[in-house]
Amino acid sequence: MASTKRPRTGLDPALNEKCINTIRCLAADVVQKANSGHPGAPMGLSPVAHALWTQVMRYSSSNPKWPNRDRFVLSNGHACALQYIMLHLAGYDLTMNDLKSFRQVGSKTPGHPECHLTHGVEVSTGPLGQGISNAVGIAFAESHLAAIFNKPGFPIIDNTTFVICGDGCMQEGISSEAGSLAGHLGLGKLIVLYDDNSITIDGETKLSFTEDVCKRYEAYGWQTLVVDDGNNAKDQSAILRAIEQAKAEKNRPTLIKVRTIIGFGSHKQGTEGVHGSPLGPDEVKYVKKLFGFNPDESFVIPDEVAAVYHDAAQDGRAAEAEWNEMFARYAKEYPDLAAEFQRRMSGRLPDGWEKQLPTFKPEDKAQATRKFSQLVLEKVIPAIPEIVGGSADLTPSTLTLVKGQHDYQKETPDGRYLRYGVREHAMAAFCNGAVSYGGLIPFASTFLNFTSYCLGAVRLSALSHVRVLYIMTHDSIGLGEDGPTHQPIEIIPLLRAIPNMLTLRPADGNETSGAYKIALSRENNPSVLCLSRQECDNLPGTSVDAVARGAYVIQDTDGPRRVILTATGSEVQIAVKAAAKLKEHNISPRVVSFPSWELFNEQPVEYRASVFPAGVPVLSIEASSVFGWERYSHAQIGMRSFGSSGPWKEVYAHFGITVEAAVTAATKLVDFYPNGAPDLIHVPQIA
């Protein structure tokens, strides 16, 4: 699709300079009014941003979700004052009052970009290295969807992903993982502008960072270019030439190193003094006077500058209108593809997909829940074509590749299976980028214990309210011989502590189907599926649909000496067997399967109290840390230390996670509460 942008600011150096200096002064004002933030990078990067938003990128500020817009990612999210200023100038739903509310509670201009708060922000960035890694997933999504939907004469998907990042992003290990993957995949529509200003919070980068970044990225398979002077406010031709050269390279991503001066124009320029604090009132006045602005006025946008950005926004609306006209013709020629494209971009799942979920009977073969997961994926992946994903070099263990899939590689961009390599952190950030593009449901997979390797990006999935599936196997000490380094102890409680995260630990085949049903249905939640290595029986009483309630009764009896055994995942097997033995001790047990705390907490208190009635003591069983179980149980069987290497049954026995231990503990619990146990469900959450 040809660009509708026309040369504008490059023809008038004086107007060019005024536009850029307007951005610099606004950056100083925004941070100064908040008395918090980073003015330096926005001031240094103003020429780059001006070039991108007026002469390079296609966007539609009146429709921030236009599918074929160019994507912009600010990876050095501390420089977000720059992004907010550009969004305001370009006509997005971000007012001058929003700029004046920078870093204030409830504003659209938080201290780092958050995609669920601000129109025009594609991904939540801030933790350094995340944004550039998200961008790899975004560029993948463009490539993959173009391979699926584009037809001759109809480039429905044809856009570029632009990134601005800084030295901090380049130092974080996640960006190295992602950069290596991007080079391997040949993502030619990914262009990263690296702000080489030689300053971090500690001071000059030479204190800790002296490598040749361009050579490193060349080794990753990137094209690398250098702009020696990124500060010129009259002429951005060097920046524009580099971007055009980057766009001409179709088979490699491009890194453009742009040398800038942080805090350009202030007395503190080129120092860490402008990295993380306001300039100060007097210095703001000095900067404005230097750049030809009234030092006594704030938040000023000259009419001629506003007109430049108004024209750029008009160009974007024209580009969207051209695309809409093309899509209308596409819909006539390829109606099924057009309907499928619209369905995917809306986030709506195919009608009737749930009917493909397998169900299981007690007489069906016992299998590990990771194997049940594979059986579910074999049904839902053909039914939901937007599911894409893979494993961090553990495909034979996580069982995430199913029949009929083929790999996404640069030669086969229509492939749906991703070989992330041993790059757990980049894998999760990649998924956050891919899901932000629209039209895809990405998944990532590794051993549950290695969630800790990708936790920064997993947390951002939850913060960003995106549908990413984390298919994590080998979920307990039950993985056995690999020992404590691989056995997750604290990971499940950690995941449960993350707001807006669904942690699902299914007990058997039906619950595994139920876990996928809820994870795929929740558009605004990421989900972690915790799956066993060891085999699990298909238990009487389990249900696909009951998983949505978080916890439910799978076995019940009445009697004078009652106790509830509750468990998750593979330990539900122990609870069921222990319940049978407790009957021999004249104790009446109820068994509650508890696949998801978060889903259970969403239920009405009446339902929760019906599952755990007042007065009945509760014993929880989980081969993970007991941390947090005191909310739901009066006694806990679980882990209070790291694990041990050995066959899984011996490891369970060593730590007392057995049927016999459960029977003993339940008996003691009943004896300890002869007159009824304290009610845990109705305890008010006062604070």
Image (cartoon, grey):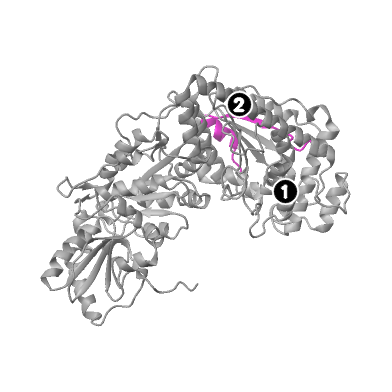
Q: From what the image shows, is residue 221 above or below residue 555? A: above
Percent x, y for residue 290?
Answer: 87, 46
Which residue occupies the extreme bottom position in the image? Answer: 675
The local crowd at label 1, few if under 14, some if 14 to 19, many if 20 or more residues have their Cα within 10 Å, is: some
Q: Residue at x 84, y 29 (%)?
A: 12
Which residue is under mark 2? 323
In front: 211, or 454?
454
Q: For this view, does 96 lie left or right of residue 605?
A: right
Q: CA distance from mark 1 to mark 2?
A: 27 Å
Image side of residue 152 versus residue 166, left or right: left
Compared to residue 170, the image places residue 575 above or below, namely: below
Q: Is residue 276 above or below residue 15?
A: below
User: Magenta part of the protein: which range?
Assistant: 210-232
Q: Position of residue 323 (x, y in %)?
A: 60, 26
Name the image quarter holding residue 253. Answer: top right
Residue at the far left in the pictured view: 584
Residue topped by disc 1: 95
Q: Which mark is residue 338?
A: none
Q: Earlier in the sequence, mark 1 or mark 2?
A: 1
Return the x and y of residue 453 as percentages of the image width and height. 43, 50
Residue 610 in view of the camera: yes
Three-letter residue code for mark 2: Trp
In front: 481, or 653? 653
Where's residue 568, x and y in %?
29, 58
Residue at 22 percent across and 76 percent down: it is: 670
The reply to whether the magenta stretch includes residue 215 is yes
Magenta stretch holds residue 304: no
At label 2, counting other C-alpha atoms closer than 10 Å, the crowd grade (few under 14, some 14-19, many 20 or more) is many
